[in-house]
């Protein structure tokens, strides 16, 4: 595009009108390019990269919102203290457990529903909308409803689950069952979303592959395992990756179910790495320590995504 | 290939079975919101339904203010997003200039960083600016979205170059091409942007709960959370709140559903 700009410039000798000079400016890739990224560059600088840097500095300081001027440099002390904090490891184990249980389960359910929904002709749109709705519903609304469903005596879900030997307790307030409650909540929220993602993936698989499979005498199950699952591998990668990120970031649900109690109620049973971070930063006003925790979450997410990429590549 | 009758039946059975789990929570919320205090916890015929909870909640709580706040914040961010993301995406997809690669890297890089890393300094900035409990505080830090820039850029890349060349011959400059050629073509992609931005802001909780501490500045999600804590013994009231918070998002979703499904199909995932 530079030659044309040069041409415009060389033509724009004294006699050129204001209008055509404006036109020329509007035709310069450089000018329009910078003009159009200027808003995001400014906003990003102020509200993303500056805070990112600030947070990184905080993480090596002993600093609080209450008295930010009294900050002192403490080196790696915050990071070391977190590593020694039992509550951090509890929170991390909860996040890890949630990830290990909820992410594969929601991926499997999503795949099973998608494969079946892809084959039916009638009510397809209706089913898809219905399965998708939990994902677009506010996490606070969903948690509120589930708390009533899983309430002692009155909860429909609690009563239903007593048939399978579960006790008649308020799940969200019970130290033993609160985390399981969070898992159910998570799976319910995300399954429909990943189902739609799988549905998109299924539509990219060419039909003749199945026809070739049919000629070779593969039945439905064999087709599913030998053709569908391997063909969907890139989609599964995305579903697992995004699932890990979502579940590692779980915060609204434990916040809502704690009601007026402290984050992670009952008795820390629903603490996650994010509730741990949040209570350090905003309940105990420890900006430096909280920032260090935030960078640990960041590192964990990056680390897990690399690990998962490795793992998925080695398979097959 | 066609299913046998039996296979077809089993598929519908399975889909229907799963649907139950997805319908029950929604059904419970709507049903309970229509119950009078005496009927809570009982199965009653629709003739006993009442709207008194809706009247109650509008007259006794600040929900109207929360609605207004949610609407202002959601639309403020939506408009900002559409302008900032779309112009940036066009610039990154179609214009050549020095430093474009760096800008692209900075935009994409945002998708990898969790919000926890930024929330402490942003909270401090908002406090310093005296923007706690204000629309500015709830809107301005959120006017851009790396993921949505990426989504729009992917779309602009698919527009054939010939269209631009033809437009240039007709005397349109780069800005003209953006407004007259690119924007009219990107209705679908903009629809995707609208639904992601709208649902994301309307449902957002951690930011408004952090940046506001005065109940008159609550948005709907934060308001519902306090309602639930205060009236936990009255499921009819809290479920009314749930329905009121959820209905707008369902309407927007049904209007733009097509675009969301397309968005997922073209870009993979929301990060």
Image (cartoon, rainbow, N blue to C red):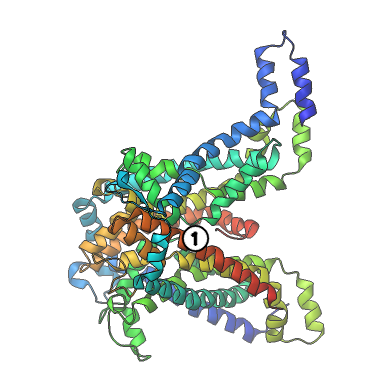
Front one among A66 and B75:
A66
Q: Position of residue A273 (x, y in %)?
A: 41, 67
Q: Would residue B237 be seen by someone viewing this image from the given angle?
A: no
Image quarter for residue A60?
A: bottom left
Q: Position of residue A145 (x, y in %)?
A: 33, 69
Q: Residue at x 56, y 34 (%)?
A: A38
Q: Residue at x 71, y 73 (%)?
A: A231
Q: Residue at x 68, y 72 (%)?
A: A313
Q: Position of residue B152 (x, y in %)?
A: 61, 47
Front one among B24 and A135:
A135
Q: Position of residue A221 (x, y in %)?
A: 68, 86
Is the residue A243 above or below the residue B52 in the image? below
Is the residue A28 above or below the residue A45 in the image? above
The quarter of the image holding the C terminus of chain B is bottom right
Task: Say which element carries label 1.
Answer: helix
Chain containing the residue with disc 1: A
Local crowd size for mark 1, using a 10 Å CA cut-off: few (<14), some (14–19), many (≥20): some
Q: Which residue is mark 1?
A: A298
The quarter of the image holding the N terminus of chain B is bottom right
Q: Would residue B238 be seen by someone viewing this image from the given angle?
A: yes
Please indicate whether residue A149 sits to the left or right of residue A28 in the image: left
Q: Residue at x 63, y 84 (%)?
A: B7
Please indicate whether residue B138 sits to the left or right of residue B82 in the image: left
Is the residue B164 above or below the residue A188 in the image? above
Please indicate whether residue A49 sits to the left or right of residue A122 in the image: left
- Total marks drawn? 1
Give the residue furthest to the top: A15
């Amino acid at each position: 595009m530079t030659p044309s700009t040069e041409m415009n410039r060389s033509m724009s000798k004294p006699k050129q009108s204001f209008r055509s000079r404006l036109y020329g400016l509007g035709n310069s890739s450089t000018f329009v390019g910078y003009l159009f990224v200027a808003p995001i560059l400014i906003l990003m600088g102020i509200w993303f990269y500056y805070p990112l840097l600030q947070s990184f500095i905080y993480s090596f300081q002993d600093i609080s919102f209450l008295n930010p001027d009294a900050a002192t440099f403490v080196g790696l002390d915050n990071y070391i203290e977190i590593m020694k904090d039992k509550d951090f490891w509890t929170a991390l184990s909860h996040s890890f457990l949630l990830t290990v249980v909820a992410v594969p389960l929601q991926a499997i359910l999503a795949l099973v529903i998608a494969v079946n929904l892809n084959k039916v002709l009638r009510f397809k749109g209706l089913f898809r909308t219905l399965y998708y709705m939990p994902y677009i519903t506010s996490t606070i609304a969903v948690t509120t409803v589930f708390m009533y469903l899983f309430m002692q005596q009155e909860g429909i879900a609690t009563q239903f689950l007593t048939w399978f030997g579960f006790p008649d307790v308020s799940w969200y307030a019970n130290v033993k069952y609160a985390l399981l409650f969070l898992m159910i909540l998570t799976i319910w929220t995300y399954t429909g979303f990943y189902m739609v993602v799988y549905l998109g993936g299924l539509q990219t698989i060419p039909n003749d592959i199945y026809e070739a499979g049919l000629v070779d005498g593969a039945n439905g199950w064999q087709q599913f395992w030998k053709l569908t699952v391997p063909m969907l591998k890139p989609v599964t990668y995305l579903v697992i990756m995004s699932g890990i990120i979502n579940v590692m970031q779980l915060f609204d649900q434990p916040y809502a179910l704690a009601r007026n109690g402290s984050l992670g109620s009952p008795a820390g049973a629903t603490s996650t790495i994010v509730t741990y971070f949040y209570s350090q930063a905003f309940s105990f006003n420890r900006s430096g320590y909280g920032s260090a925790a935030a960078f640990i979450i960041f590192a964990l997410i990056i680390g897990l995504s690399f690990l998962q990429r490795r793992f998925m590549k080695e398979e097959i | 290939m066609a299913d046998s009758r039996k296979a077809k039946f089993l598929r519908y059975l399975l889909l229907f079975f799963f649907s139950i789990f997805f319908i029950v929570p929604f059904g419970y919320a709507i049903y309970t919101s229509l119950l009078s205090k005496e009927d809570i916890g009982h199965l009653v015929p629709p003739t006993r339904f009442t709207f008194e909870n809706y009247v109650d909640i509008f007259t006794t709580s600040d929900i109207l203010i929360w609605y207004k706040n949610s609407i202002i914040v959601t639309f403020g961010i939506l408009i900002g997003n559409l302008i900032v993301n779309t112009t940036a995406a066009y610039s990154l997809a179609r214009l050549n200039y020095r430093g474009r690669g760096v800008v692209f890297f900075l935009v994409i890089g945002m998708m990898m960083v969790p919000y926890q890393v930024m929330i402490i300094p942003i909270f401090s900035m908002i406090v310093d600016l005296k923007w706690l409990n204000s629309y500015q505080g709830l809107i301005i830090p959120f006017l851009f979205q790396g993921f949505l820039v990426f989504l729009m850029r992917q779309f602009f890349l698919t527009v054939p170059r010939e269209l631009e060349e033809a437009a240039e011959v007709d005397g349109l400059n780069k800005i003209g091409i953006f407004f007259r050629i690119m924007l009219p073509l990107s209705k679908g992609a903009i629809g995707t942007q609208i639904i992601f931005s709208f649902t994301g802001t309307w449902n957002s909780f951690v930011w408004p709960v952090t940046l506001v501490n005065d109940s008159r500045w609550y948005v709907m999600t934060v308001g519902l959370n306090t309602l639930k804590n205060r009236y936990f013994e009255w499921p009819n009231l809290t479920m009314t709140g749930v329905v009121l918070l959820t209905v707008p998002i369902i309407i927007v979703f049904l209007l733009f559903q097509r675009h969301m499904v397309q968005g997922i199909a073209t870009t993979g995932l929301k990060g």
